[in-house]
Amino acid sequence: MALSPQWLDELRMRTSLSAVVGRTLRLTKAGREFKACCPFHNEKTPSFYVNDEKGFYHCFGCEAHGDAIRWLTDQRGLPFMDAVKELAAEAGMEVPVPDPQAARRAEQRASLHDVTAAAQDWFESNLRGADGVQARSYLGRRGFSEATVREFGFGYAPEDRQALKRALGRFEEPMLIEAGMRIMVEDKEPYDRFRSRLMLPIHDTRGRVIAFGGRILDSEANPNAPKYLNSPDTPLFDKGRTLYNLHRAAPAARQSGRMIVVEGYMDAIALANAGIREAVAPLGTALTENQIELLWRQVERPILCFDGDKAGQRAAMRAISRALPMLRPAHSLVIVRLPTGMDPDDVIRDQGVGAIEQLLAQPASLLDTLWDFEKAASPLNSPEDKAGLKARLLDHVDSIQHPDIRALYKRELLERFSAYAFPPRPPREFRPRSEWQKGGFKPPAPSLSPEARDSLTRAMAGGARDSLTRAVIAGLVKFPDQILRHEDALSDLARRDQNVGPALDSLLEAAETLDLSTQSTISLERGLPAPPAKTLFAFLDEGIDPGDAREDLAEAVSLLVERPALESALAEATARFERDPEGSIADQGRLRERLLALNERLKRFGRRKAAADGESDT
């Protein structure tokens, strides 16, 4: 019976490995993993670990390694299909019925593996022979050691269009074409795909050769030929589901705790040649969702290491765009940008392996990279430009599927945008009190324009939506030295609430001209409507200590600013119910809880005042 790799991957994803292993082995929690003494060799100190997120077990003592299926076959001795059936029954999956066509395809794949293995042997022998002089010279210039050349299986494909056909004559032509080794065109004889190229085998996760990549050696003689050429997709090879060098990098990543993604396979080999063995590369395409999942099975935050030029920036952004919808707790990407015009090999050659290690040790977060890229994407000289930046950032946020991560990204990016688009006003120049008092001169109190007085009058007389807003405005007039203390919060509220925005803007403008050293006040000329005689807000009482009044006023400002922000977020969460019902309901619940807590704080505010009035009455 032939089981597809996709079906087996689904089975592994639905299986809790620790539950399977824990039936016959006592496991102890160790961070995000489980540990135990290895059942495959005698040991007193546990070196056997089970990782549910990555779906494998590993012993650092005897190197035993495998997934849930391997555990049942190796530890319990079950035949492969019996192990699969047992796990499928527990996972609620139907085992595919025998399919004669699938069986034939499986046999064909096995035959195609024979083709690629034979081609690899032939390429390697060519590199060692007389035809491989130019290729060996190129490898020498790149500084690749003999051990690296052997480990990565470098080979050479000669110029002759029929050379591989003659060398692999035991395989039929259709098989060579299906394996991607030959090209068939109408009305012409098929010919070898790879010619006059340095060859590299591409392996699956089991270490079997499934495809090839070839680098041209004489670009002047072939100016129109691509610099790198990969095998096409075949029954063995799907470039969107394959990462170059993963079968070597995965064990190294388990030791180092990191996985590095570079742009091309020569970059991965250059890092391995320098001793950094946990590097992989996509194969001529942007990083795909399947490849990101492969990476997350190894580490939680793979390091994307891209060239510092514009092409490298675009590659990083394409990867980020693919990853954003997939983000989940503790799983993300981090990004290293190399110096402009340099690839990993250039950095190692010019600055040594220590320089690349230093860069890898200080990657930028996905969020930082997203912010930096979009901020630099176009000029930001006008309000329209800045609004475009905000729209681009929110488009990225909207693509995130996980509700908590989406909310956190939105909050962080909007805070950065606000700090950039609405920078704080410059600090006022300090003027010593003595300068104002020379000759008995006392600076006049700043007065409000008629328009400013009118806006404050409307807000105090009922234009503000509630007593809290009116009380805060009255408190700021009473204690104008507190206006600039709360400048950021008041500016944000002015943008949100058009009813009190003009009044708050007037106060902020007037406060900038205050001389606090002389306890200057705001001149109201005609005055403002007085707050109610009976008010819940102690900071408006005449007899209250000024220090206590200022602290109560600060809390009132906090309550005033937080409420519209929560109400706006609640309205937004409600509006997206149709496209994201689960996330909308969860966000609405959290926001309503915060609103209830805020209202309770308001009630405590009133109870404090009532208690204080009761004490004064007695």
Image (cartoon, helix red, strand yellow):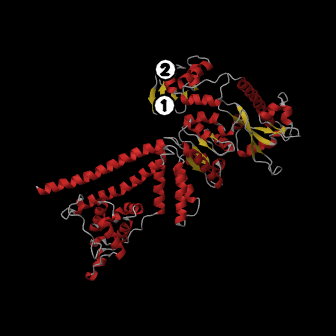
The answer to whether 405 is drawn above or below residue 518 in the figure is above
- Residue neighbourhood size for the residue with mark 1, other residues' Cα within 10 Å, grouped as few (<14), some (14–19), many (≥20): some
Give the secondary structure at mark 2.
loop
The answer to whether 12 is drawn above or below residue 591 in the figure is above
Q: Which of 317 and 151 is in front in this view?
A: 317
Give the image location of residue 342, x and y in percent: 65, 52
Q: Which amino acid does label 2 sit on?
A: Arg
Q: What residue type is labelled 1?
A: Glu
Quadrant holding the N terminus = top right
Q: Which of 245 and 345 is in front in this view?
A: 245
Label 1–label 2 contact, CB within 8 A: no
Q: Residue at x 39, y 52 (%)?
A: 566
Give the image location of residue 103, x and y in percent: 71, 24
Mark closest to the chain's N terminus, 1 or 2: 2
In the picture, the disc for residue 33 is 1
The answer to whether 513 is drawn above or below residue 535 in the figure is below
Q: Residue at x 24, y 68 (%)?
A: 530
Q: Which of 420 and 407 is in front in this view?
A: 407
Q: Can residue 333 be seen in this view?
A: no
Quadrant holding the C terminus = bottom left
Q: Can residue 611 be seen in this view?
A: yes
Q: Which residue in the structure is indicated by mark 2?
A: 23
Circle nearer the viewer, 1 or 2: 2
Residue 546 position by quadrant: bottom left
Q: How far apart are marks 1 and 2 (CA)?
A: 16 Å
Q: Would residue 102 appear left or right of 482 to someone viewing this image?
A: right
Give the image location of residue 417, x and y in percent: 48, 58
